[in-house]
Image: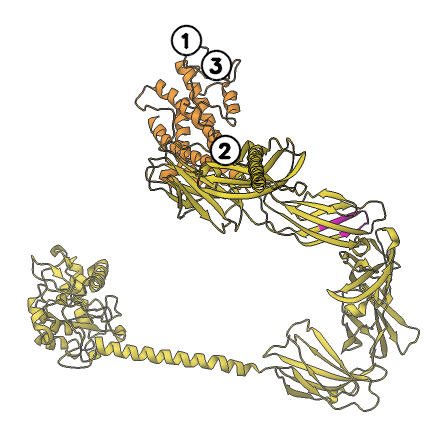
Amino acid sequence: MMKILAAGVVPLLLVLHWKPGAGSPLPINPVNATCNTHHPCPSNLMSQIRSQLAQLNGTANALFILYYTAQGEPFPNNLDKLCGPNVTDFPPFHANGTEKVRLVELYRIVAYLGTALGNITRDQKTLNPTAHSLHSKLNATADTLRGLLSNVLCRLCSKYHVAHVDVAYGPDTSGKDVFQKKKLGCQLLGKYKQVMAVLAQAF
Amino acid sequence: MAVISISGTTLLLALLSLRTLQSLVLDERLLLTPELINISINSEHQSLHLQWTVPNLPHQESRMAFQIQISRFERSKVIWEENYRSTVKQGQVLHWSWESELPLECGPHFVRMKSKVVDAKFPKPSFWSSWSPWEKVVAQDSPGPNELLVFPKDKLVEEGSSITLCYVSGSNLKNISCYLDSEQIPGERLDANVFAFSLSNIPFIRKTGTNFFCGNSTHKEDGTVLFVSKVLEEPKDFSCETRDFKTLKCTWEPGPDTGLAWSKQPSQSYTLLESFSRRKEHCQHRSWCHWQISQGSQETYNFTLLAENRLRRRSVNLLFNLTRRVHPVDPQSIKFENVSARSAIMTWKEYSIVNHCTLLCQVELRGEGEVTQQHNVSVEVNGEYVLSGLEPDTQYATQVRCASASHFWKWSDWVPQKIITFEAAPSEAPDVWRNVTSEPGRQNVALFWKPLSKHQANGKILFYNVVIENLDSASRLQLLSIPAPATQQELMLDPRCSYRIHVTANNSMGTSPASIVAVAGDPGNGTENVKEERITGTDGGFPLSWKPKSGDVAGYVVDWCAHPRDTSCDFQWKHVGPNTTSTVISSDSFEPGVRYSFRIYGLSTKRIAYLLAKKTGYCQELANILIRIILPMILCVLLIMILCYWKSQWMKEECYPDIPDPYKSSILSMKKSKENPHPTIMNVKDCIPDAIEVINKAEGTKTQFPGTRKSVTETELTSQPVYLCLIATENNYSSPGPCICFENLTYNQEVSASDSCGHGPVTPEEPPSQLGLLASSGSFLKALEKNYTNSLEENPSGNSLRYVSQLASPLSGDKESLPTNPPMLVLCSEYKMQTAVPSCLASPPLSEDSSLSSVTLLGESEHYS
């Protein structure tokens, strides 16, 4: 299982989780863990989470299309081979679990996706410097994911007193060749589109 | 014996020598065998780099040859063999590189080499050493059984070049296809699981690279991105120039940008190299570069512009003398001095340059958008040029530019500046005329003048001076100053005196020449003898001619009113020369149908005007126009009236002829249609029946209207049969008298017999009740009328109609005779149903004879109600 902190997203996650001693993987819900958030949690948390999930689900396909179109042929015509949602180590999600379980799993997924999206954004800015529309959509999605992560953490913290969740991050693509970067990004966004539909339905 | 002995010894010696030689050769071959100490791989450049030594080199330094062999996949498959020569010192490490067409990752490579001394200093025979052992080079480990790898990765190539790619597949993978972008590429098997793909003349598709992708149906795939660069072009139009002898600016056309995404290749760089000074400048821009001129005396420069990217270098040279590349700085501080109405001095400054190079400057003068003057001026530092021949009070656009006079290279940019010349006194006298009218005891002179043109005014006219000189009293001068833009002045003069009137125009710089008009003491002198003549205008105006005036003539004047209908008149005049006796007066203001009057004056040398002729006429007679417009309208109206009349006649004949013809009537044609099994719809909108009858049957029945099926309840009616005449269809029924409604069974007995609203018999002694109904309730009548109308609209079907004619009297064909002869009603009883009622409910008073039944009826009606 690949648990590599991606350079582009680590600062973001550190900001979200920062506290003395932050930086190590977060165990789930240690007993008597203090549950502090940087900002006061809004009252309509679940409503906001649902809204953010709906927003992400609504834009996921457009992002996916923009991405594989920007990579050039043969990506648009070989989506099943090059962009299938074959992402190893993707955090699981059980829609029939309790809300607490679902929120913890959602947290892991959003953290994973946030990291992966950071890598994709970084790669695409280098590889496709003029694909401004793609960059814009990647950034907007990353922003929403960041907000969603914060809200999920708030919910876990305020209602279930879960202060820490072990997370796994997306694969590091920095050492890969360009084709592999393109392919991994495409697979990840295909997976993102797929999982967002499930998540939006589950909440 | 001795010979044998000598021969044997010689043979022995020879054998010993041969053996010794053989031994030496074998030793040398072994000693000179190269020893490969390192083989490194450069995947990006697909090259092997060999390092070796030659141990036990017998000499300090020897020229040696090396033979190098490279095999791929197997040792026996030698793909490259090369001889390499070098001077080798003892203990020296030798280097050699080999670049492979096929990516090194596509398979294992094997390398070996041998050597021999080829130095002329050592003439003894030399032999190739033994081969060094094969060295295996592996750039990529074999893939797993389900793994697929494509090489080379992220390769940078130039557009139009060739490249070979390969895939290495695991043993379990079959049927792998490869695509460049979306085009499938055929491959060539190199080894059991290695295929090569040769691409030639590879195209540039996008800066972000071209995808090469291999895969099979089991979703095992890999790919690579080819970064295809555009070919770096040689810079074009390379040129250098100076504007200040301090800096050279070199420019060129760079050609296409060869930069690629993913930092595979930045845009090409440019470097300036100067051979005399041996200086170098890395340019910061793609198309130009600055070069600082040293303070020394270098006049000649030999530049090399070097363009390079990761794949290629291009360069161009330029040799020039600095003094022949002078592009002067734009002229500065352009000013105008001593500006007058007609001239000005233009001055400017040039940038001070070393060597005091003389400049050639061009001065251009533009007035009203056109170049009016262009001059060349030789300038060193301060430029100056006198602009002359200018017009007063006029704005001019000037511009100046300069170039090196000794060695023309380039003009500077034009530098514009505007100038407005001063005003001058008006150059022409205003065009003046007068209109004199006399009243008892005074003479009214309306003085008119025309504004001066811009060319004549030489500035803004501020006012006009009118000096009235009484010729009969030399001491009396009257001056009037009339502010511009007035163009007329009323004067009241003494009719007993003669006057000379001077008119001048004035601007800020002075006065124009005077225009003189003389007014005689008796303006009516001779005018009564002038008869007015009739003239006809043409499209071009009014042609006028007159008899020349006897005596000295200074000229002639024609005057007229441009708008004679207006009170302002819009007085106009035209001067013509003394030798002219005809002219054409044309004006856009002339209108058809307006009468214009022209007066023709002769002017004496003393400027006294004599009326010579009066002419009047129209530029176009309005009557003609009216005829052209109205006549077609009348014809149209007549045509329409004829058509209407014909239409009405046709309608009458078709719908209500005086004597209806059953075979022509469109209504009766429904009889035929009844025989037709298919329903026929008859359009009765154009056919209005002459009358509607309302039949009041006996108690227990309902009154129905033919063709409607609407009924009136019995309680509203008496048990007596009643006929109603609801609509008079002929206008001539406005005359007093009843109308007659009857059913003509001759035409429609079947319909009559079958209709449930059949007409009951009517007797003369029963009529009161019918009028009683009519007179008792006007609203009811209106309702009936409405029902009737509705019935026509709602149920035009012929099946429910019954033809009713009020005209077909068997006694008389004159329908108008019926109302005037009430006793005829009895005679009409021969019809099955027939009665007479007043023509309309609001009918005028009946005559004495004919009022009997009506009055009686009215009385009954009141009683009934």
Figure check: B298 above or below B18? below
Mark 2 element type:
loop
Give neighbour class at mark 1: few <14, some 14-19, many 20+ (Cα, 10 Å).
Answer: few
Q: B420 or B608, which lies in front?
A: B420
Toward the front, the furthest residue is: B1
On what subunit does the disc labeled 3 rest? A
Q: A140 or B420, which lies in front?
A: A140
Q: In the image, which lettered chain appears yellow?
A: B
Q: Indicate which disc, 1 or 3, sits on the residue closer to the N terminus.
A: 1
Region rendered in magenta: B241-250
What residue does disc 3 label?
A36
Question: Real-space Cα distance between discs 2 and 1?
Answer: 68 Å
What residue does disc 1 label?
A31
Q: Nearer the viewer, mark 2 or mark 1?
A: 2
Amino acid tagged 3? Asn
Is the Cβ of the residue at disc 1 closer than 8 Å to that at disc 3? no
On what subunit does the disc labeled 1 rest? A
Question: Real-space Cα distance between discs 3 and 2?
Answer: 69 Å
Q: Quadrant of the N terminus of chain B?
A: top right
What residue does disc 2 label?
B133
Residue B830 seen in the figure: yes
The percent coordinates of residue B656 (x first, y second) are: 21, 76
* Same subunit, tags 3 and 2: no
Mark 3 element type:
loop
Q: In the image, which lettered chain appears orange?
A: A
Q: Nearer the viewer, mark 1 or mark 3?
A: 1
Figure check: B666 above or below B256? below
